[in-house]
């Protein structure tokens, strides 16, 4: 019996889209076609691959309002914020710009006797398993450089954003990228694991939960398939005594609450120097009290529902447990809070690291704020986490931020900004956030493998 994937809209709980899963045989055949097509694709000039990928990116941008409305229906982001094309285009454009230099062979020797050179070659077929929270931007992080580097790509998108992969494949095919070179595949978890275990991919990139990342690595065990993962996060912000207070509050609270808190590098805990603490909390509460929770299709809505009732239930549980343990909630329950996907954004104080809301990933519109008296105390608290994606430091002293950054267990250190993915820098994490790196020159290194040529010339 064919399994059906169903996207349940958080707007009203209705089935917004559904698609049948590929069987194992159908999926295996799809990967085989990709493997065959990849050879011809990799043989094309790099410039041509770049042009085709960027044409596909532009075609996605032309889909405009349709995409924005679909995203609101599928995962709840208010239409007033538009789609993701800005970041989608920025990331792909940067990877296209650096491709020629990054993939240029490393010439070690060119003499009368020898030619010695290291080249970067594509893995073959790359599986991209993308999440629902920023479904276009997270997918393009790997799809664009993988294709540019000469790989074929099979994209498996999250069920919550079921139509995104279909949209991307349509756009890329319309501009001339062969259908077998970039495929959107509807797969269930079991079939995905079976394909990886069968050693059908040259590389696997997964963005999602820690549990999902473990499943990918278990499936790949013994195949020597490279697996890149970007998993959970509990990203901290630290506001020092010399910080620009207004900028810190605006940026950190936006980083905690935008997209209903469903951001990979969203701010989930904030530590504020005691001299600024009361002012910070007051300003933060004012900002959140100005939000309007509601239907994401309504132009006045600034915060839509969480993508799934299950996700909202976890955030409510963390908040309730914290309140029972002595935390203080600063935001009154909104009239639109239905106990389901529509969730009141919340600021908590009097929190401790004994509470799950300060330890477990929330991935929702809640943030705990703690008072600290020193850099040492702040660093200890920031490092008291199983995750390590980003940390946001607020100070006017670059040297101080850099010195503290060296002590923080994280993949990215921000100073005076947060919740941003710079395509020129490696997107990576440590601890249970996963391993590997996307974007930047390192992204290309992970999507290719080195091959050495040691050529001895015949001399008379």
Image: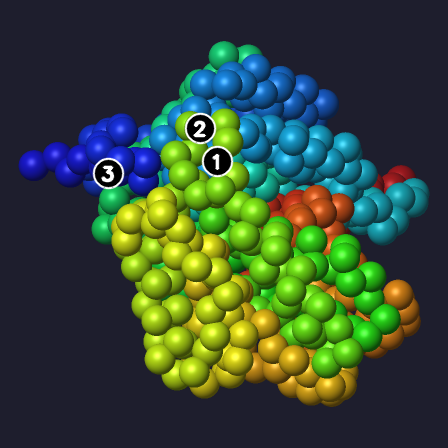
Which element type, helix, strand or loop, lies under badge 2?
loop
**Residue sitting at x 27%, y 28%:** 17
Mark 2, residue position: 298
Foreground mark, 1 or 3, reads: 1
* Residue furthest out toward the left: 1
For the N terminus, give its image quadrant.
top left
**Residue sitting at x 53%, y 46%:** 291
Asked whether the viewer can see residue 331, the reply is yes
Q: Residues within 10 Å of mark 2 (few under 14, many from 20)?
A: few
Depth check: 173 or 47 in front? Answer: 173
Q: Is residue 86 left or right of residue 27?
A: right
Mark 3, residue position: 13
Q: Residue 335: horizontal and vertical position, in percent?
A: 36, 47
Foreground mark, 3 or 2, reads: 2
**Residue sitting at x 49%, y 42%:** 292
Q: CA distance from mark 2 to mark 1?
A: 6 Å
Q: Residues within 10 Å of mark 3 (few under 14, many from 20)?
A: some
Question: Is 136 located above or below residue 419 in the figure?
Answer: above
Q: How is the image coloured?
A: rainbow
Q: Could you tell which of marks 3 and 2 lies nearer the N-terminus?
A: 3
Q: Is residue 342 left or right of residue 407?
A: left
Depth check: 5 or 193 in front? Answer: 5
Which element type, helix, strand or loop, lies under badge 3?
loop
Q: CA distance from mark 3 to mark 2?
A: 17 Å
Q: Residue 117: horizontal and vertical position, in percent?
A: 78, 47
Mark 1, residue position: 301
Q: Which mark is residue 92?
A: none
């Amino acid at each position: 019996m064919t399994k059906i994937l169903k996207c349940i809209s958080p707007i009203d709980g209705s089935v917004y889209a559904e698609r049948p899963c590929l069987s194992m045989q159908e999926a295996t055949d799809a990967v085989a076609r990709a493997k065959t097509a990849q050879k011809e694709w990799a043989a094309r000039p790099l410039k041509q691959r770049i042009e085709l990928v960027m044409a596909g990116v532009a075609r996605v941008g032309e889909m405009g309002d349709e995409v924005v409305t679909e995203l609101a229906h599928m995962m709840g982001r208010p239409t007033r914020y538009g789609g993701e094309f800005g970041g989608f285009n920025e990331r792909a454009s940067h990877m296209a710009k650096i491709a020629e230099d990054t993939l240029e062979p490393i010439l070690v020797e060119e003499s009368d006797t020898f030619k010695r050179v290291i080249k970067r070659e594509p893995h073959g077929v790359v599986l991209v398993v993308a999440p629902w929270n920023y479904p276009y931007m997270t997918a393009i992080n790997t799809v664009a450089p993988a294709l540019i580097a000469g790989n074929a790509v099979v994209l498996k998108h999250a069920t919550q954003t079921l139509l995104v992969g279909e949209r991307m494949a349509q756009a890329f095919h319309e501009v001339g990228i062969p259908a077998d070179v970039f495929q959107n595949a509807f797969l269930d978890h079991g079939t995905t694991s079976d394909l990886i275990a069968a050693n059908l991919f040259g590389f696997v990139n997964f963005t999602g939960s820690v549990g999902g990342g473990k499943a990918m690595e278990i499936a790949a065990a013994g195949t020597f398939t490279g697996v890149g993962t970007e998993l959970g996060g509990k990203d901290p912000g630290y506001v020092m005594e010399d910080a620009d207070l207004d900028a810190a509050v605006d940026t950190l609270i936006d980083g905690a609450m935008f997209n209903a808190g469903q951001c990979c590098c969203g701010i989930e805990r904030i530590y504020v120097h005691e001299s600024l603490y009361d002012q910070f909390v007051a300003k933060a509460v004012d900002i959140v009290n100005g939000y309007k929770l509601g239907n994401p299709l309504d132009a006045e809505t600034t915060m839509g529902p969480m993508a799934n009732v299950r996700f909202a239930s976890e955030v409510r549980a963390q908040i309730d447990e914290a309140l029972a343990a002595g935390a203080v909630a600063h935001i009154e329950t909104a009239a639109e809070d239905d106990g389901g996907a529509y969730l009141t954004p919340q600021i908590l104080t009097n929190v401790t690291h004994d509470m799950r809301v300060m330890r477990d990933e929330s991935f929702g519109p809640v943030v705990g704020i703690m008072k600290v008296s020193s850099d040492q105390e702040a660093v200890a608290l920031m490092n008291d986490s199983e995750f390590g994606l980003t940390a946001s430091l607020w100070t006017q002293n670059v040297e101080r931020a850099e010195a503290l950054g060296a002590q923080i267990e994280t993949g990215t250190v921000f100073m005076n900004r947060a919740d941003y993915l710079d395509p020129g820098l490696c997107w990576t994490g440590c601890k249970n956030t996963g391993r590997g790196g996307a974007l930047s020159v390192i992204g290309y290194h992970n999507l290719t493998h080195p091959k050495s040529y040691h050529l001895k010339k015949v001399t008379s």
